[in-house]
Image (cartoon, rainbow, N blue to C red):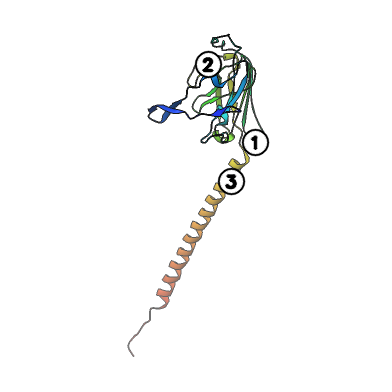
């Protein structure tokens, strides 16, 4: 975990279940200043590049003496989910600060939004996650498998058929057509060969009658 202008911290594996592991780290408060915002991201080396863009974000330290702040009320005041020209999903949400907001797409997965500014969240989901022409429902929650906490902002979108999918389908049809043509040519060649052999056999029979 890389905290900008502070340090890099190695997370320790605290549990290991089938399919995934859980990693945690304890950070001493002495490493941080009061009333300061810190940006962080995850990498595999110290001061490395951001390898989990969807999980990067920022946290704000409270004022000195404020103590532990209660968790903010989970509330969304605005949300927009749209498709780009290349089929990516763009998600923009406004709500209270410091929330964990997940876009959940049943049958596909959940996606954690990044707080890009106080109370502003967003994420871009690559088009390769979706099947072109298929309709996907979505809603917002506070955990990966949570319930719909903002029914007024859920909905559905039909994934855009992107050019590479069209090209792939057209290419598949072309190869299928070529295969059919090749099979027909082979069958024709076999038929011609059989006919030629039969004619040659009939013409090669000689009558050696008595002299």
Q: Position of residue 150 (x, y in %)?
A: 57, 14
Q: Residue 37 vs residue 203: left or right?
A: right
Q: Residue furthest right?
A: 85
Question: Looking at the image, is mark 1 or mark 3 nearer the viewer?
Answer: 1
Q: Which label sits on residue 86?
A: 1
Q: Secondary structure at mark 1?
A: loop
Q: Position of residue 138 (x, y in %)?
A: 55, 22
Of mark 2 and mark 3, the one earlier in the sequence is 2
Q: Which numbered circle lies on residue 170? A: 3
Q: Residues within 10 Å of mark 3 (few under 14, many from 20)?
A: few
Which residue sits at x=60%, y=16%? 34
Q: Assess whether mark 3 and mark 2 are in contact (beta carbons under 8 angstroms).
A: no
Q: Identify the image quadrant of the C terminus.
A: bottom left
Place residue 120 in its image quadrant: top right
First along the sequence among labels 2 and 1: 1
Foreground residue among 133 and 120: 120
The residue shown at (60%, 42%) is 164
Residue 56 in percent (x, y) is at: 57, 27
Residue 148's disc is 2
Give the alpha-carbon distance from disc 1 to disc 3, as whole Å: 18 Å
Residue for point 54% across, 47% down: 172
Q: Secondary structure at mark 2?
A: loop
Residue 135 visible from this viewpoint? no
Q: Earlier in the sequence, mark 1 or mark 3?
A: 1
């Amino acid at each position: 975990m890389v905290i900008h202008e502070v340090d890099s911290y190695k997370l320790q594996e605290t549990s290991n279940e089938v399919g995934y592991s859980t990693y945690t780290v304890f950070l001493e408060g002495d490493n941080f200043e009061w009333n300061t915002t810190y940006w962080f991201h995850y990498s595999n080396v110290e001061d490395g590049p951001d390898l989990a863009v969807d999980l990067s974000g920022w946290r704000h330290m409270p004022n000195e003496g404020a103590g532990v702040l209660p968790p903010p009320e989970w509330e969304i005041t605005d949300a927009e989910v749209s498709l780009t020209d290349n089929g990516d999903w763009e998600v923009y949400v406004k709500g209270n600060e410091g929330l964990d907001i997940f876009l959940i797409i049943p049958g596909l997965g959940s996606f954690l939004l990044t707080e890009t500014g106080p109370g502003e969240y967003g994420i871009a989901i690559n088009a390769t996650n979706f099947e072109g022409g298929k309709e996907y429902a979505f809603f917002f929650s506070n955990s990966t498998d949570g319930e719909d906490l903002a029914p007024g902002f859920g909905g559905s979108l039909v994934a855009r058929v992107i050019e590479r999918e069209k090209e792939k389908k057209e290419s598949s049809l072309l190869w299928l057509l070529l295969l059919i043509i090749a099979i027909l040519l082979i069958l024709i060649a076999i038929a011609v060969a059989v006919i030629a052999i039969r004619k040659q056999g009939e013409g090669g029979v000689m009558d050696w009658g008595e002299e």
